[in-house]
Amino acid sequence: MTNDAKTRLARRLTLSDAIMLGLGSMIGAGIFAVSSVAAESAGSAILFSILLAGLVAYLNATSVAQLAALYPESGGAYVYGKKQLNSFFGFLAGWAFVIGKTASCTAMALTFAYYIYPQWAHIIAFSVTLLITFINYLGIKKTAWATRVLVVLVLLTLLIVLISIFAGDQFQAERLFAWKQDYKIKGILEAAGLMFFAFAGYARIATLGEEVIEPQKTIPKAIMIALAITVVLYFLVMVTIIASLPLIDLVTSSAPLALAVEQSRFSELTPLIRIGAAIASFSVLLSLIAGISRTIFAMASNGDLPRFLSAVHPRHKIPYKAEIMIGTTISLLVLFTDLRSAIGFSSFAILIYYSIANLAAIRLNKEHLLFPRTFAHIGLLICIILAINLPLNSIIGGVILFALGTIVYFFKNKFL
């Protein structure tokens, strides 16, 4: 990768920008897209799944924070795998990130569309993907500003949900203890793997390593702060929803937060919740596409993907060819993919991605450790456990694509 300043990305993001990008990548995904799917697996025991998903997210975050401080470059675990393990693990991490987060983008675009106008969901998802690609094309500073506004609006939406339920006398604490009757370890693990989809956004900060001011200090702080806020908020909202809705309504509803408000005496606020859900999905999609393009940029710069994808726009200082390619790909996928499949496949790929990040953290020298090495060992173990407990079709699809990636890697190294 050349050191010519014209080919590098501009360092413009402050600590607050990085935190907002992390929040924009996490807040909303689990609440508005995954909660019903996860509740179907775990029932009212989903609260344990949220805590487990939050725990593995924290452990993974400690690994990513240490590695990002040591290697403040675009690419995340793609770079960490290469530097700490070998080129194959680096490639596999990059492959996992790109395909997993492409599935995440597909899920978020569809979620946005289902809340806006479900009858035309695929066309709306196609259109919003193209719009966000254009916003990201204008430059990362504009993306950070837009994400900051969106996060504030989403937080206000969740606040309306909480106030409506509590003020409407819907909260029934005994529903929180229904898990004692029907919980299953397999269901809790499966739901935790699905819920992890919602927590994985903190890595977006690390993938923007070349654009963060003082990355050695900023990246670890931003990751931990954004994750802590998200875990607390998710748990609080899910406790409220579980206590306000019968489990069957939670499992069968495609918009459980809107349903909870609709059944309260403040039902006239329901449209605001639907708008807030769409904003949340938009916010996550905005940050996801930016993160994927930076990983493609890093892989292309190192020859693991076609080198033309490493081109940096002379004015906006963003990897514009990678941005256009990923935006086009997602806009086509949303026309043919369903939401549940996208979420399950994304979870599998990203759990593998963080497994590699944890392996890389285990190999850190003592002087580079910011957290106990045991954290990385436990994070690796839980990632593997959650991955193998996901729905079978997600596992099979993931294994096939990772096998394809392995073939691509060895073909490239042997013949090209």
Image (tube, rainbow, N blue to C red):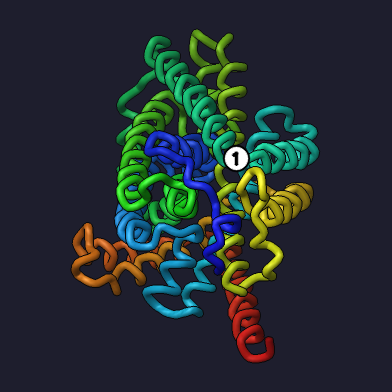
Q: Residue at x 63, y 38 (%)?
A: 111
The amino acid type of the residue labelled 1 equals: Leu
Q: Residue at x 69, y 49 (%)?
A: 338
Image x and y of residue 357, in percent: 39, 65
* Residue 1 visible in the current orientation: yes
Number of marks: 1
Q: Which residue is drawn at 63% across and 82% down?
A: 407
Residue assigned mark 1: 286
Image x and y of residue 362, in percent: 29, 71
270 w.r.t. 334: above or below: above
329 w.r.t. 94: above or below: above
- Depth order, front residue of 379/298: 298
Q: Which residue is drawn at 66% across and 39% down?
A: 138
Image x and y of residue 146, in percent: 57, 30
Secondary element type, mark 1: helix
* Residue 191 visible in the current orientation: no
Q: Point out the image quarter for the C terminus.
A: bottom right
Q: Point out the image quarter for the N terminus.
A: bottom right
| Image quadrant where residue 238 sits | top left
